[in-house]
Amino acid sequence: NELELGTTDIANKLQMPMATAHRILSTLTEGELLEQDTKTGKYRIGPAFYLLGNLYLSTIDVTKTAEPVTKMLNELTNESVAVGILNKGIVVIIMREQSTYPFRIAEHIGSLYPAYASAAGKALLSELTEAEIDSLYPDERLKQVTKKTITTKTALKLELEEIRKTGVAFSSEGAYEGVEGIASLIRDASGRAVAGLGMPVPVFRMNKVYSSRLALLLKMASSVVSYQLGYECKENP
């Protein structure tokens, strides 16, 4: 029931070296999962933890419905499968199935990415109006995450227009170097896009044929989840 703990207390409770505890605490503080009292040096739960808790409560139907479908995709492809939601221009991973390949992407629940850098994020951004995109990104230049991250709002808008036509979003090493992402939208009963269903795949396993196959599987899978959430697609009943 202790609301604040120091580094020594945490290291003792977790039975880990002080240096390791300090490194982990610093990382969690940078991500706002924890915050440190400047006077006492002790740590307490940060705003991002509360955000994730609220996001969990608001997306519990999505996670329950998507779980068997993500497992199925994972079994069919052996690739990682993730569900992400959009929050103020940031994609938050709320569900994931780990790849069974020896080489896999180190992505976990709670991972955060700029929406324009990830496939799931682009899919979700494609639902926004041009005015909403301008409000979200007032500057033309976008901050780079990797050398291949999309760097301008103009280029982003062009890509979003293509996503609206195809229903599939791609990100080639935009969020992680050496990783290509593919994603499609999950909709609720009202037709609102509530999440992105995506797959991060190492570039050495990707080619045009495999990419097309995964894109088709993701569109089908996201349609199944959307249907189970009550969405009725008029174009493809």
Image (cartoon, rainbow, N blue to C red):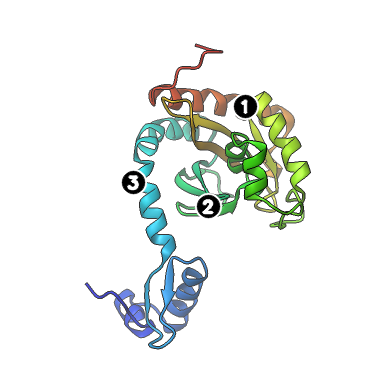
Instruction: Estimate the spatial distance between the alpha carbons at disc 1 and disc 3, rounded to whole Å.
Output: 27 Å
In this view, the residue farthest toward the left is 1
Q: Which mark is residue 8?
A: none
In the picture, which quadrant includes the N terminus? bottom left
Q: Which mark is residue 107?
A: 2
User: Is residue 106 visible from the viewing direction of this image?
Assistant: no
Give whichever of 2, 218 is nearer the camera: 2
On screen, residue 121 versus residue 156, left or right, reads left
Give x and y (percent) for residue 57. Answer: 33, 46
Say whether disc 1 or disc 3 marks the residue closer to the N-terminus: 3
Pointer 3 local density, CA inside 10 Å: few below 14, some 14–19, many at least 20: few
For disc 1, the marked residue is 167
Residue 18's place in the image compared with 110, above or below, is: below
Say whether disc 3 or disc 2 marks the residue closer to the N-terminus: 3
Instruction: Estimate the spatial distance between the alpha carbons at disc 3 and disc 2, rounded to whole Å.
Output: 21 Å
Residue 97's place in the image compared with 8, above or below, is: above
Q: Residue at x 38, y 38 (%)?
A: 63
Give whichever of 186, 198 is nearer the camera: 186
Give x and y (percent) for residue 148. Answer: 76, 51
As shown in the figure, which amino acid type bears the numbered disc 3? Answer: Leu
User: Is residue 54 visible from the viewing direction of this image?
Assistant: yes
Q: Residue at x 73, y 30 (%)?
A: 208
Find out whether the residues at labels 3 and 2 contact each other: C-beta distance under 8 Å.
no
Give x and y (percent) for residue 75. Answer: 47, 33
Find out whether the residues at labels 1 and 3 contact each other: C-beta distance under 8 Å.
no
Image quadrant assignment for residue 166: top right
Say whether disc 2 or disc 1 marks the residue closer to the N-terminus: 2
On screen, residue 117 versus residue 60, left or right, reads right
For disc 3, the marked residue is 57
Q: Residue at x 41, y 67 (%)?
A: 46
Q: Residue at x 29, y 77 (%)?
A: 13
